[in-house]
Amino acid sequence: MQTLAAVSLAGGQGKTTTCYFLAKMLAKAGKKVLAIDCDPQANLTFFLNHEVASNQPTLLEVIKGTVSTVDGIYPTSEDNLFLIPADSGLAKVSEYLSGSGTGALILQIRLQAIQELFDYVIIDVQPTRSQICLTAVGAADWVLIPAESATKGVNSLLDTQKFLDEQAKVMAFRGQILGIVPFRDRWVGRTQTLESKDNIAAMKEFANHAPVLPTIRESEKFKQATRQGQLLSELGVRDLEYPFEKIIELLEDCKELDS
Ligand code: ATP
Ligand code: MG
């Protein structure tokens, strides 16, 4: 089982979008995939069309250990794709994690029980240095850093790298950065806007050996796909899926090297 988390310390950088498409595309390719919503905004839960009933366990109960990990896992409308959902109540988990002494390791421990059940775990992470973010990063073999192709995205990348370095120094992040994914790369016709070009060049400069992966183009089609629970290929714009196809290739290559 390989665990991948999408992390950025600023909001609106494409984390949930990346998780949604990766999880769905991996599942379509026949992999057993578990998506985990580590954000009390619960956008991934919403995109995967899961409604949390008040008496049903979510990630909150899984992290606290009041239910077993499998009891927090739900099927989705996609074969092979399962979800540990979140709702706004997840914010309450901070208290538990900060009180436990080893908060950053808790999610990793909870996932040990399901090692044999999934090929990939895809974690959508809250955009703050919260306890939830720490435990998500602690569970990750791989981190993707999506970053908007704008000044805000470059700053978010720098903050996120610094944060991951700090976590690595105290052994609370033992994975690797799989890559940086420029988000909302804007082109007008065949010409990339200067803003996108300059900011992606800055990302390459600051990447610090992490690969800067193919960009996610600015397009309303992504919103349309997530709203309708579809893939970009199902909307007839398969070329927009390219960055996710490349990430999947990278993950598969890493898995082969591992074994
Ligand atoms: P948050 O930090 O708030 O959780 P996020 O990093 O998860 O945000 P997303 O929710 O994936 O970011 O995307 C931010 C916004 O950009 C959303 O409103 C989404 O619909 C929109 N969006 C997604 N993909 C694209 C795209 N390719 N082009 C333009 N807008 C997009
Ligand atoms: Mg999000």
Image: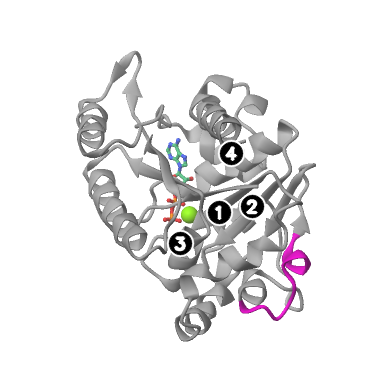
Question: Which residue, as the protein is rendered here, is positioned at the far top?
Answer: 190
Q: Residue 20 location in percent, x, y?
A: 59, 44
- Give the mark, 4 or 3, whose residue is nearer the N terminus: 4
* Residue drawn 58% across the image and 21% down it: 238
Rendering coords of residue 139 (x, y %): 53, 59
Q: Residue at x 51, y 44 (%)?
A: 17
Is label 3's Cβ within 8 Å of ligand 1?
yes
Q: CA distance from mark 3 to mark 2?
A: 14 Å
Q: Position of residue 248 (x, y in %)?
A: 57, 32
Q: Which residue is mark 3?
A: 126
Circle nearer the viewer, 1 or 3: 1
In the image shown, does 24 or 96 lie closer to the viewer?
Answer: 96
Verify whether residue 71 appears in magenta.
yes
Q: Are marks 3 and 2 in contact (CB under 8 Å)?
A: no
The C terminus: image quadrant:
top right
Three-letter amino acid code at the position of disc 1? Ile
Please report contact status of discs 2 and 1: CB closer than 8 Å, yes or no: yes
Question: Could you give the CA–CA distance between mark 4 and mark 3, rounded to whole angstroms?
Answer: 18 Å
Residue count near mark 3 (Cα–Cα under 10 Å), binned few <14, some 14–19, many ≥20: many
**Can the viewer see residue 109 in this picture?**
yes
First-in-chain label (2 vs 1): 2
* Chain part drawn in magenta: 64-73
Q: Earlier in the sequence, mark 3 or mark 2?
A: 2
Specify the quadrant of the image occupied by residue 229. top right
Which dot marks residue 212?
none
> Which label's residue is closer to the chain start, 4 or 2?
4
C-alpha separation, residue under disc 1 versus residue under disc 4: 12 Å
Question: Which residue is labeled 4 in the image?
Answer: 21
Question: Residue type at mark 2?
Answer: Ala
Q: Which residue is mark 2?
A: 35
Task: From the image, tell me which residue sits under label 1.
Answer: 123
Determine the secondary structure under disc 3: loop
